[in-house]
Image (cartoon, grey):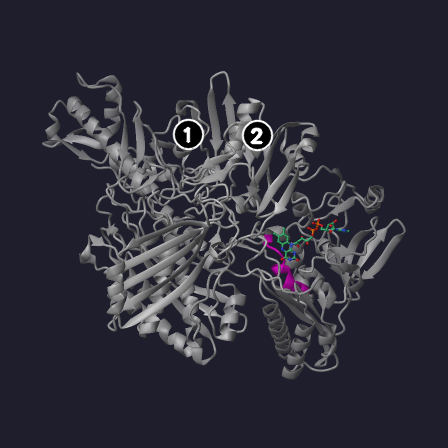
Amino acid sequence: MYPSRFRYESPTSIEEAISLLEEGKGEAKVLAGGQSLVPMLKLRFASPELLVDINNIADLDYHRFDADGSLHIGALCRHEHLEKSADISARQPTIAAAAPLVADPIVRTRGTFVGSVCHADPQGDWASCMVALDGYIVAQGPNGRRNIPVRSFVSGPFQNVLAYNELAVEAVIPAPQGTALGGYMKLERRVGDFATAAVAVAVDMSGGKVTRAGIALTGVGGTTVDASDAAAALVGGSLDEASIAQAAELAASVAQPRSDHRGSASYKRHIISTFTARLLGSISESNERAA
Amino acid sequence: MSLDEIKIGGMGASRRRVEDNRFIRGRGNYVDDVVLPGMLHMEILRSPVAHARIRSIDVSKAWEIPGVRLVLTGDMMATRNLAWMPTLSYDTQAVLATDKVRFQGQEVAAVIADDPYIAKDACEAIVVDYETLPVIVNPDQAMASGATLIRDDKENQPDNKVFDWEVGDRPATDKAFEEADVVSEIELHYPRSHPSPLEPCGSIADFDRSTGKLTVYMTTQAPHIIRAAVALVAELPEHMIRIISPDLGGGFGNKVPVYPGYVISILASILTERPVKWIEDKTGNLISTGFGRDVYLKGQMAVRKDGKILGVRMHTISDHGAFFSDAQPSKFKIGLMHSAFACYDIPAAHLTAEGYYTNKAPGGVAYRCSFRVTEAMFFQERMIQAAADDLGMDQAEFRRINLVRDDDFPHRTPFGFLTDSGQYGKCLDVALEAIGYEQFLKDQEEARKNGRYLGIGISTMTEPLGAGNSREYDILGIKMFDSAELRVHMTGKAILRTGAKTQGQGHETTWAQIVAHELGIPADDVVVEEGDTDTAPFGMGTYASRSTPVAGAAVAMVARKIRAKSRKIAAHLLEVSEEDIEWELGRFYVRSSPDRGVTIQECAMAAYSNMPDGMEPGLENTAYYDPPNLTWPFAAYVATVEVDPETGVWDVLRMVAVDDCGVRINPMIVEGQIMGGLTEAYAMASMQFITFDAEGNCVGSNYMDYLLPTAWETPGFELHEVVTPCPHHPIGAKGIGECATVGGPAAFVNAVMNAVEHLGVRNIDMPLLPDRVHEAIATRSDISGAPPVRTDAP
Ligand SMILES: Cc1cc2nc3c(=O)[nH]c(=O)nc-3n(C[C@H](O)[C@H](O)[C@H](O)COP(=O)(O)OP(=O)(O)OC[C@H]3O[C@@H](n4cnc5c(N)ncnc54)[C@H](O)[C@@H]3O)c2cc1C
């Protein structure tokens, strides 16, 4: 691989990283897992003057559930850690279902959750999980930290609202309102392929009723698609055949798929509806079993 | 007491691959591992557009970059008469474009610099002014009247047609169709694919003015053909050219042709008097080097009510890209397409073929197949299934009725090849038994009642492997035979060289096993070397499953020459006449007193220290082998699948493979070849294709879009064997390297089609992507052609 020439720095603190970004004046790029950035350097789609490698910054490689039930994912938490952690599989079903479907096992050992959300690929799996779960990004710049809800974090395909001198330090998923249920279904042509279409569903339930719901769609729009109407229609009710069918239809109706070599637009829309129904169906089943 | 052949690693031993020792330790020596003193690096600038006139090329900015040593364009190549080169199919191909670019990815300029980063920067600094022309991306467009002429460089080329060709007996075939009760038809597309070896192509040219010698390290499956080509193209004396093909990271046919990069690196080294290394990147490999398939096939089958096939018609339209640089025997314009239906007893057949130029990458290579037999066998087995369906006959039964019977050999195939051996019916029976055919049909019926779609697909075929014989097979007039040279040293250890070139097949392991079998020298005592034209005997290289049928036979023959000489030495050592000597593995003994004997190692020592009077010293020899016929392995593949009617996703439930490749030298390696081939077959059937949008942009130019299956989605394979020795091969072996890639795809496709046939769906063209399968199910209609690159708005 023969990228353009660039300067490389490897800071050991967040503050140092931020001052390097400051120095880069918009011509710098953060290097996390490198699983999206390095291919772009190889193809010379990106030719930054400065690479700020954050891999040597201590204390960014974590995920934890706080006492209030919120999930915090540090900027160096790799996909693989989410895939293989017992607390994730026990407490956060949407993330647990998506983790083994992101990229391939090799990429998952390097790629980061936060890097993926920053990359803002409309086909990124984590962004959909974040949307379905009402997650937010904690950004740190020279003037301190701010929280950015994921819905306003992504500003377009491969674009986010971070200032050039800001680093995303963690992603946060708020505590569930009741029992956290959910799942992720992805149609891919092969392991390691981006989604032809995928659906993230997160449903909090209490006393047989839906207290909160989020549905987001991958690969069927210029950015992650928030199927908020489909989700809203579920809140307050129970998950039955009729409500599931309605949500599936609403989700499919907001998808904006394009026909390409992965499949036709109408097929992708059909997959969104099928997967939404399948996910909600199995959530309803597992809720009934638990009850 | 005779040696235990398995213990010495002889025939039938599943000996571990000796080459893996270095490969798994990262100690392989590939072209890119070779570093020569003073070496420069070359990068190629490729065309971003598929069809355009070149108005101008401005290289001045590239020259300004420090570290740039040479910038080459087509005009500069032309001053050396090297702007164009001959192809392996008697056409010409641009080395660096002069007049026009004719496909996206075509070589336009080259930069030679101190390091590859500089070379790449300099390529970006070259400004090319293109005047775009209408683009042709398929034969339909190519043959349309008024179509833009792609090859306006050629004389006598009024249109985009490459060739018209036919074979078979038209009147007899017409008559067969008149007598038919049922005429079945099918029309298919075999999509363009790419061999995509792990290692892309590359070369290091090293011209030494003081000796006049040109040494080229090159990723080639056929080093001797390349030497001949370089001698002819670059007009250098052949003895001053040394081609070294070191370890190859796979070839699959991709590394047979001569590529522009090789030629440019050679001229660059001559001009700079420094070694010049060119290593293609993966995208360069995918978009510019030899592809596979890209053929439209249609045909008809004439059948009698009782299931007897009376005749077949085939018509193929092939897409060759911008230059006709197929690597194939000269005589056959569409390769060995006419090997179709070779395993069936069919009295009459006729094939017509047309080839077209398009604005796509050139180089229809035999991607893991013996020159278009993959397309032939795919068509054959899809046609067979269609005809069985039309007759309302069980597909296994229909095959059984028409397969050539064991006592029918030698058998003339419908297009005139001669097959010589096989147990076709038995292979099919073994496969059906293994899969539990009758039970599956019952399960399928039950499942259908519950809305589940199960399917079973069969593919049975024999294919011609191991070109030559030299009577019929040549490339650019060079006859297709092969060679082996064996040197047995004083202590009974040996070095063996052949004219073939291993690229993953395990020659270093298996050739030593043949020597062990013939001479009783333990395989571990034989080192095998290939790929250096200064040391290896002349041969045609490795592709088309020809190594074991041809070079492997030469190994046996040269070992027999060594044995014959050793026998004379043994007689001398034992002081008896040669007629009184008997041979057992590894040892000669006196017939009348078997405990008086000498080992092959003792004979070797004597060949250098105690030879009989009048005998030439030494124990070395060479054999050239021109096979009397091709070898004809047989395979029966059966796959079962379940299709999800809601999504079109299909899963392979089981895949049973029964292969008869004659005597197996190393069963483990044979099984590895079959599993690898089935994996590629599954890839073709399920996900793999290279396509082009209307502007000629290649979709499939990287490994995110051109899909190679991983261990995750590749199904498990259940392998079985039947052994019918090849009657003319010295050790009874037949080719096996490609059977599964060739025969496998139809098994998967037939299975999916069988799962949805009750909906009236008759064909879905490969790859059977879920959206295509779903569309067929939803609309109850066929899906034909290459997967379109759709660009409609949301
Ligand atoms: C073969 C392959 C297959 C893949 N398949 C999938 C898939 O199926 N689904 C999927 O979702 N993804 C897939 N990916 C992408 C993968 O998940 C990446 O890991 C992820 O998108 C980016 O994470 P990263 O840590 O590697 O980020 P990097 O590549 O290091 O960075 C990506 C971008 O985000 C920026 N960035 C990273 N971290 C920060 C930060 N903390 N603050 C500010 N900016 C930051 C970088 O500057 C860069 O612009 C695939 C990648 C490969 C190579």
- Residue A101 in magenta stretch: yes
- Residue A141 in magenta stretch: no
Separation of disc 1 and disc 2 at Cα? Answer: 19 Å
Q: Residue at x 72, y 43 (%)?
A: A47
Q: Residue furthest right?
A: A143
Q: Indicate the amino acid at tag 1.
A: Leu
Q: Residue at x 64, y 60 (%)?
A: A99
Do dots 1 and 2 share one subunit? Answer: yes
Image position of B562 with respect to B191: above or below: above
Span highlighted in magenta in the image: A95-105
Residue B604's mark? none
Image position, residue B570 (x, y; %): 18, 25
**Considering the numbered disc 1 on the image, is that residue within a helix, a strand or a loop?**
helix
Image position of A276 with respect to B536: above or below: below
Q: Depth check: give the residue in front, A4 or B660.
A: A4
- Label 1 marks a residue whose chain is B
Q: Is residue A199 left or right of residue B95?
A: right
Q: Residue furthest left?
A: B592
Residue assigned mark 2: B76
Residue assigned mark 1: B232
Disc nearer the start of the sequence (1/2): 2
Image position, residue B462 (x, y; %): 30, 54
**Considering the numbered disc 2 on the image, is that residue within a helix, a strand or a loop?**
helix
The secondary structure making up most of the magenta span is: helix
